[in-house]
Image: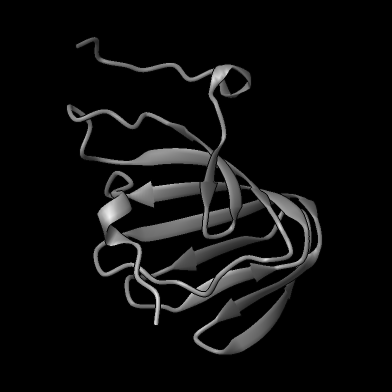
Amino acid sequence: MENYMIARFDEIDAVKCPCGFSRRAFVDPENPKATMHVVDVQQDARVHYHKKLTEIYFILEGDGQMELDGRRVPIKPFTAIFIKPGCRHRAVGRMKIVNVSIPAFDPEDEWFD
């Protein structure tokens, strides 16, 4: 494996996720460190949490709110949110975000109440 990876998000297929649709980069068994996702958040985002993952959301487009442990916080483009493991969260409204997952995204670490 090279000492770097390149992702072209326009060439990555979107998959359904609790927030809407996600294009996931750097998801590779040889990369346990971090992944980056571009997410099109839909109105029907589900409250969820992670036991191991820390996520950083960076809002690119749209506005609305982030629900964080039951509290709603207004967001707009160029807002960043650091979400620790165990924080129940969801985006409320339609928006496009960058999501960085540390360690690398693991679909087995998505939990719903």
- The x, y position of residue 1, in whole percent, is 19, 11
Q: Is residue 93 shown left or right of residue 83?
A: right
Q: Nearer the viewer, residue 52 or 17?
A: 17
> Which residue is more in the foreground, 20 or 96?
20
Going 33% across and 67% down the picture, which residue do you hit?
A: 50
Which coloring applies here? Answer: one colour
Q: Position of residue 45 (x, y in %)?
A: 62, 65
Q: Quadrant of residue 51?
A: bottom left
Picture layout, residue 71 above or below residue 83: below
> Is 10 placed left or right of 111 in the picture?
right
Q: Report the side of 5 relative to 51 (left or right).
A: right
Q: Position of residue 110 (x, y in %)?
A: 35, 63
Pick the quarter of the image with the C terminus.
bottom left
| Residue at 20% from the left image edge and 39% from the top image edge | 32
Q: Furthest-top residue in view?
A: 2
Q: Nearer the viewer, residue 28 or 44?
A: 44
Q: Is residue 27 above or below residue 46?
A: above
The percent coordinates of residue 53 (x first, y second) are 31, 59
